[in-house]
Image (spheres, rainbow, N blue to C red):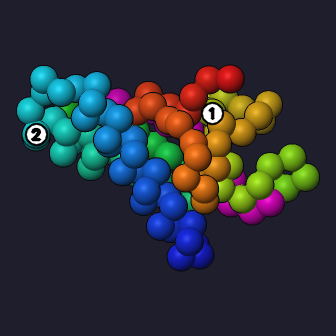
Amino acid sequence: MQEDMEVALDNLIDRIVEDYSRFTKDFDQPRLERFHAGLTVKEGKKYFKIIKGDIEDDQTMVWGFVVKEDTPKFKRGDILKAAGWAAPATNKARGNILGDDYTIRWTGPEYL
């Protein structure tokens, strides 16, 4: 993974946690730390899959996908909503993590 993409993915995770902390302002710090620990990035052939999990609840879900390399339809760093566990929705990018102009929620990429 190239360094700029690694930094951008770390920033994305931080922004997801930041949005969660605004949403859960009444919850305690251990819950916020558990949420942060449950966010993982899995590198695939075409995409990075952002997985959101909770050890206590024993549940995982795909937060979204990030495009690894330019394609005819998408640019490197584009954020895609999950269509399911293994694939993104390829109708439109929800932003690009290599720029600073994107909005996300802790629940997933913004809807169109």
* Residue 19 location (% of width, % of height): 35, 35
Q: Is residue 33 above or below residue 56?
A: below
Taking the spot 90% from the left edge, 52% from the top edge, the residue there is: 72
Q: Please tell me whether residue 87 is drawn above or below residue 5 in the rendered image.
A: above
SS class of the residue under badge 2? Answer: helix
Q: Judging from the image, what secondary structure is the residue with disc 1 in?
A: loop
Q: Could you tell me residue 76's position as x and y percent?
A: 72, 59
Work out whether 44 lies above or below 60: below
| Residue that mark 2 sits on | 29
Residue lying furthest bottom in this view? 3
Q: Amino acid at mark 1?
A: Lys
Tell whether position 60 is magenta: yes
First in sequence: mark 2 or mark 1? 2
Magenta stretch encompasses residue 65:
yes
At label 1, counting other C-alpha atoms closer than 10 Å, the crowd grade (few under 14, some 14-19, many 20 or more) is many
Q: Residues within 10 Å of mark 2 (few under 14, many from 20)?
A: few
Q: Is residue 83 visible?
A: yes
Give the label on residue 26, or none.
none
Q: Position of residue 10 (x, y in %)?
A: 42, 59
Give the quarter of the image for residue 54: top left
Left or right, 53 with respect to 9, comes to left
Residue 110, percent across and down?
57, 28
Q: Looking at the image, which is closer to me, 65 or 109?
A: 109
Q: The C terminus lies in which quarter of the figure? A: top right
Q: Which mark is residue 81?
A: 1
Residue beneath the point at 13% across and 23% down? 26
Name the outermost residue toward the right. Answer: 72
Residue 44 in view: no
Q: Amino acid at mark 2?
A: Gln
Q: Which residues are magenta?
A: 58-70
Residue 48 is left or right of residue 75, and the answer is left
Q: Are marks 2 and 1 in contact (CB under 8 Å)?
A: no
